[in-house]
Image (tube, coloured by chain):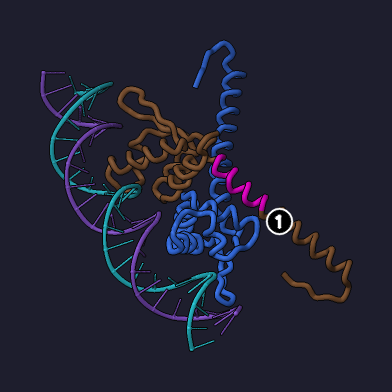
Chain colours: A brown, B blue, C cyan, D purple
DNA sequence: TTGATAGTTAGGCATATGCTTAACCAATCG
DNA sequence: CGATTGGTTAAGCATATGCCTAACTATCAA
């Protein structure tokens, strides 16, 4: 659990590209060899491989060579790590709003007749 | 709902930096002026402003000037957009595994005595 | 009105990213 | 074997990103 920040860097960076997201979308429908991943992408194969490298470095995809084809598959754990970070923020934010709401209610019941806006 | 992809690009890109995530973490505990955001960051003010710009461009943060201070606040809708994309992938992926599971169960009950591994 | 505070603009520079082409390697297939 | 298919490596280049310093503007306070 050390240096989780660098993991998140790689994770979100990997997701910040439409080509890479398209690759993930394809892979979430099932494993595929590199050439099939590349098919719908208007780009040279080496470029596709580089994107794949980014996805693997982020832990989002794992791939294995069998014969001369490299089969890629999604690694859903990484995705949920990203989700967890976002979730944690949302929870913090909502808790804050709840506290604020409680506070405002307290004001309301204590000093009837004030107009205390945030 | 046009060109949602560019939105996601900006969104994930904004999240792919530890300084920017730290700013979001701070803001999810409540609004703050730029100078307070900058305090824990070992970086020049202009650099912090640039990060803020990225966050605003991504729709993650909104800010407003009152007097000579600019007060920043989190914009939680943007975060949930990112979450939605991730969620959609997870759902696709899980549905696929369910189908696969069903299929394997079918095989099992039809051809008892085979050893059909994936 | 002068000075301090908070932010902004401009310009520049080092490194990272996203792509390309060309050449190369390794498993099939005829 | 020799050609083809699928992937890989290397080198190079254009643009984007992340930072800096210096100079500037706009409040607020004495």
Q: Quick check: can you spot residue B3?
A: no
Looking at the rendered structure, the secondary structure element under dot 1 is helix
Q: Position of residue A56 (x, y in %)?
A: 41, 36
In reply to whether residue B51 is colored magenta, the answer given is no
Q: Quick check: can you spot residue A34?
A: yes
Q: Mark 1 — residue?
A: A96
Judge by depth and name the residue closer to the eye, A94 or A55: A94
Relative to A46, B46 lies left or right: right
Relative to B77, C4 lies left or right: left
Q: Where is residue B107 in the image (x, y as percent from the top left)?
A: 57, 21
Relative to A102, B75 lies left or right: left
Q: Quadrant of residue C25?
A: top left
For image coordinates 45% across by 56% down, the residue present is B43
- Up/down of B48 relative to B16, above or below: below
Judge by depth and name the residue closer to the eye, B66 or A47: B66
In reply to whether residue A84 is colored magenta, the answer given is yes
- Up/down of A108 relative to B115, above or below: below
Judge by depth and name the residue closer to the eye, A78 or B99: A78
- Up/down of D7 relative to C26, above or below: below
Q: Give the range drawn in magenta.
A: A81-92
Q: Where is residue A116 in the image (x, y as percent from the top left)?
A: 78, 72
Graded by Cα atoms within 10 Å as few (under 14), some (14 to 19) or many (20 or more), the crowding at tag 1 reads some
* Magenta span: chief secondary structure: helix
Q: Position of residue A98 (x, y in %)?
A: 75, 57
For image coordinates 53% across by 51% down, the residue present is B21
Chain that bears disc 1: A
For image coordinates 53% across by 40% down, the residue present is A79
Q: How many numbered callouts?
A: 1
For image coordinates 80% across by 59% down, the residue present is A102
């Amino acid at each position: 659990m050390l240096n989780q920040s660098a993991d998140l860097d790689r994770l979100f960076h990997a997701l910040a590209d439409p080509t890479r997201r398209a690759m993930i979308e394809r892979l979430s429908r099932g494993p595929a060899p590199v050439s099939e991943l590349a098919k719908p992408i208007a780009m040279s194969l080496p470029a596709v491989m580089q994107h794949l490298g980014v996805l693997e470095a982020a832990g989002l995809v794992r791939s294995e060579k069998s014969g001369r084809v490299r089969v890629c598959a999604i690694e859903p754990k990484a995705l949920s790590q990203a989700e967890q970070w976002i979730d944690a923020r949302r929870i913090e934010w909502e808790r804050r709003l709840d506290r604020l709401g409680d506070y405002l209610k307290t004001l309301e019941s204590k000093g009837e007749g004030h107009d205390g806006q945030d």
